[in-house]
């Protein structure tokens, strides 16, 4: 133990800190939208000014209609012949100008909202790509896909409504109320008294919608991941006759989805009828009142006509403002999930002032390393040192913790306690990219992307040219089969490489690692029994690869174990034996048992 090593209490604290709920994001609708505005919308101020300009035109001109109607009625009264052609012409002109402004407005708002959406999606994706593996693995991948598509759509729709309603409709309402006052201020006061009352039930519905929307989005996330699983597991489902089970599972999902959406639809459906009834009562009341005022001589007929026109025109923007709250509540659920995701801090990250990582020699040292994924200890008190150029083999029953040891070296996870050093430097003091740049990982599930063979190899070193790629393929004993593929190096390998055999995928992964030419190699040997020829190829490729590099390998083959400089037997998260092949056999312990039970092939 060294004095730099954290105590186990400290490690527990660190772990608790990690497991505490993610950074608490404020959840009030107002705060959420203020943050949306600040982080994503405000920066488009130029476009917002243009939008505002169009809105001014649309709203201001809406006040012209009731005024003109008022003129027409009073004009017909005094029989002015010119009005008969002047007014229609004016109305057509106003309509044309308003239409043009509406078109520009719709285009600008759509473009703005799409830009905001793209920004959010890019940020979410880059967060998920950069964040701790632990967080990404904490939920099925479909959940994140759903957040990036469904949730973001809900936010975009709300943003469009927000811009349109909050500014354009408010402006229109102000203009129309101004017109109402100019016609008759007493009647206007009556109208203004009625509308706020109408809003109460609408606000109550909005609150319920937020809850419902949250549930719906969760449901959508689950549906996406279930479907993803169903599609991926197609072969298993058919082979095991699980069709009925799978059908009822998906059917149940869609049923839940139906129920959540139904609840939301009911809430939305209630709003328009409520507003309709309230609007009807208001108009009826106003007509009665206006009639009485005309009879008493304090209002002329033109003004009544204008007043009612303005009132009817008010209904649409008021209604839109009424439903706006509901939409905002629904989007709040999505925003809150978005910000919670973005605010979850990364624990595995580069230090502010990383120590320089000069020519890596490749000495790796584990000192009293403990690790756990959740409650249970996965690794305890792991100590070993691999000197540069040596090969260390990890063997033992599956589930013992071998892959976990490999994962800790490129800092896919950090130890809960203890230290890991590279050339004597604590991994956490090093720049993460430099650290990972010094190693190549070949794991059993070595992922191939749905891209060409050449590009899949080139992921090892993005600046490699074609000659390097071919040389790497040659060294990995992959050149022959690649040349036999329909398009050679340009053959697209299919999702996760499913157009290639297991052995072929493995050799491409090895070629990738050879191309990377890193001083440290982390290998998870394939366990699937490969045919003798492929096995020989892979074996040869592995030998080329490990020459002169520090190698840590999860070993399943006798040949690999035999050649290793050092072997650790891992069982139940502990090192139970260590030594080389001969000394371990002589011990007659766990290793000898594994050997006898043909654990190695
Ligand atoms: P091995 O490589 O020896 O087969 P692993 O290192 O893969 O063993 O796993 C060690 C233990 O850690 C197992 O009990 C396994 O269930 C658990 N484990 C592995 N990965 C995770 C994970 N991402 N989350 C939770 N537990 C895990």
Image (cartoon, helix red, strand yellow):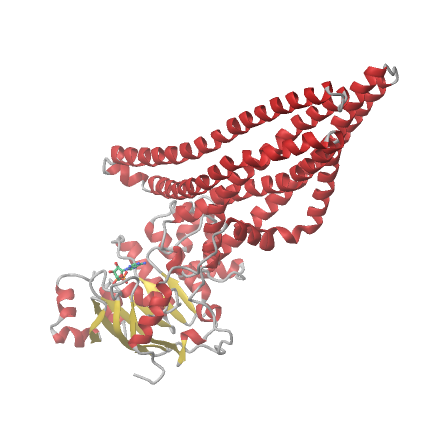
Above/below status of 445 relative to 79: below
Q: Is residue 558 above or below residue 219?
A: below
Q: Is residue 126 visible?
A: yes
Residue 60 in the figure: left or right of residue 451: right
Q: Residue furthest bottom?
A: 3
Foreground residue among 389 and 138: 138
| Residue that appears at 82% across and 15% down | 77
- The one nearer the camera, 536 or 280, is 280
Rendered-image quadrant of the C terminus = bottom left
Residue name at image x 83 percent, y 19 percent = 75
Identity of the residue furthest to the left in this view = 588
Relative side of 292 to 352, left or right: right
| Residue 386 relative to residue 294: left or right | left
**Figure quadrant of residue 573:** bottom left
Locate ligand 1 by image quadrant: bottom left
**Residue 152 position (above or below residue 356):** above
Horizontal and vertical percent for residue 123? 53, 54
State the image coordinates of residue 134 (x, y, percent, origin top left): 37, 60
The foreground one among 257 and 190 is 190
Query: Residue 505 vs residue 103: left or right?
Result: left
Q: Classify residue 426 by image quadrant.
A: bottom left
Q: Is residue 417 visible?
A: no
């Amino acid at each position: 133990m060294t004095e730099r090593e954290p105590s186990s209490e400290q490690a527990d604290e660190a772990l608790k800190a990690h497991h505490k709920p993610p950074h608490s994001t404020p959840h009030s609708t107002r705060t959420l939208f203020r943050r949306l505005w600040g982080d994503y919308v405000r920066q488009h101020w130029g476009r917002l000014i243009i939008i505002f300009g169009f809105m001014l035109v649309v709203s201001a001109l809406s006040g012209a209609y009731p005024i003109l109607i008022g003129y027409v009625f009073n004009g017909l009264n005094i029989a002015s012949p010119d009005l008969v052609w002047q007014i229609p012409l004016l109305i057509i002109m106003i309509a044309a100008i308003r239409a043009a402004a509406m078109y520009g407005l719709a285009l600008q708002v759509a473009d703005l909202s799409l830009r905001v959406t793209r920004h959010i999606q890019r940020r979410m994706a880059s967060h998920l790509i950069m964040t701790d593996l632990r967080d990404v693995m904490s939920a099925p991948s479909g959940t994140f896909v759903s957040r990036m598509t469904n949730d973001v759509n809900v936010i975009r729709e709300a943003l469009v409504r927000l811009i349109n309603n909050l500014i354009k409709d408010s402006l229109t309402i102000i203009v129309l109320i101004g017109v109402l006052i100019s016609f008759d201020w007493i009647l206007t006061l009556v109208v203004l008294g009625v509308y706020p009352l109408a809003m109460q039930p609408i606000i109550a519905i909005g609150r319920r919608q937020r809850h419902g929307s949250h549930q719906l989005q969760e449901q959508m996330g689950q549906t996406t991941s279930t479907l993803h699983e169903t599609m991926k597991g197609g072969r298993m489902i058919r082979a095991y006759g699980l069709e009925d089970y799978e059908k009822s599972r998906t059917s149940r999902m869609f049923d839940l989805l139906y129920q959540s959406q139904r609840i939301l639809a009911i809430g939305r459906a209630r709003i328009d009828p409520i507003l309709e009834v309230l609007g009807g009562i208001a108009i009826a009341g106003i007509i009665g009142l206006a009639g009485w005022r005309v009879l008493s001589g304090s209002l002329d007929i033109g003004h009544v006509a204008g007043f009612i026109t303005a009132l009817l025109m008010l209904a649409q923007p008021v209604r839109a403002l009424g439903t706006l709250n509901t939409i905002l509540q629904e989007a709040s659920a999505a925003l809150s999930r978005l910000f919670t995701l973005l605010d979850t801090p990364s624990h595995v990250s580069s230090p502010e002032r990383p120590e320089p990582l000069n020519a890596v020699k490749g000495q790796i040292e584990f000192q009293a390393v403990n690790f756990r994924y959740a409650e249970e200890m996965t690794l305890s008190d792991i100590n070993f040192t691999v000197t540069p150029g040596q090969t260390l083999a990890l063997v033992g029953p599956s589930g013992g913790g071998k892959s976990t040891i490999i994962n800790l070296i490129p800092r896919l996870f950090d130890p809960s306690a203890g230290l890991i050093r590279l050339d004597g430097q604590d991994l956490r003091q090093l720049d993460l990219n430099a650290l990972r740049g010094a190693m190549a990982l070949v794991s059993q599930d070595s992922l191939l992307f749905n891209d060409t063979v050449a590009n899949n190899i080139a992921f090892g070193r993005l600046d490699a040219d074609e000659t390097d790629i071919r040389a790497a393929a040659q060294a990995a004993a992959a050149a022959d089969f690649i040349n036999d593929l329909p398009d050679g190096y340009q053959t697209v390998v299919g999702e996760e490489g499913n157009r290639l055999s297991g052995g072929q995928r493995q050799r491409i992964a090895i070629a990738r690692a050879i191309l990377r030419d890193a001083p440290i190699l982390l290998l998870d040997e394939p366990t699937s029994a490969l045919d003798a020829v492929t096995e020989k190829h892979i074996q040869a490729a592995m030998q080329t690869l490990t020459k002169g590099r520090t190698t840590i390998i999860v070993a399943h083959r006798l040949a690999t174990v035999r050649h290793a400089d050092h072997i650790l037997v891992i069982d139940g998260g502990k090192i139970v034996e260590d030594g080389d092949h001969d000394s371990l056999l002589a011990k007659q312990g766990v290793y000898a048992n594994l050997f006898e039970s043909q654990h190695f092939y």
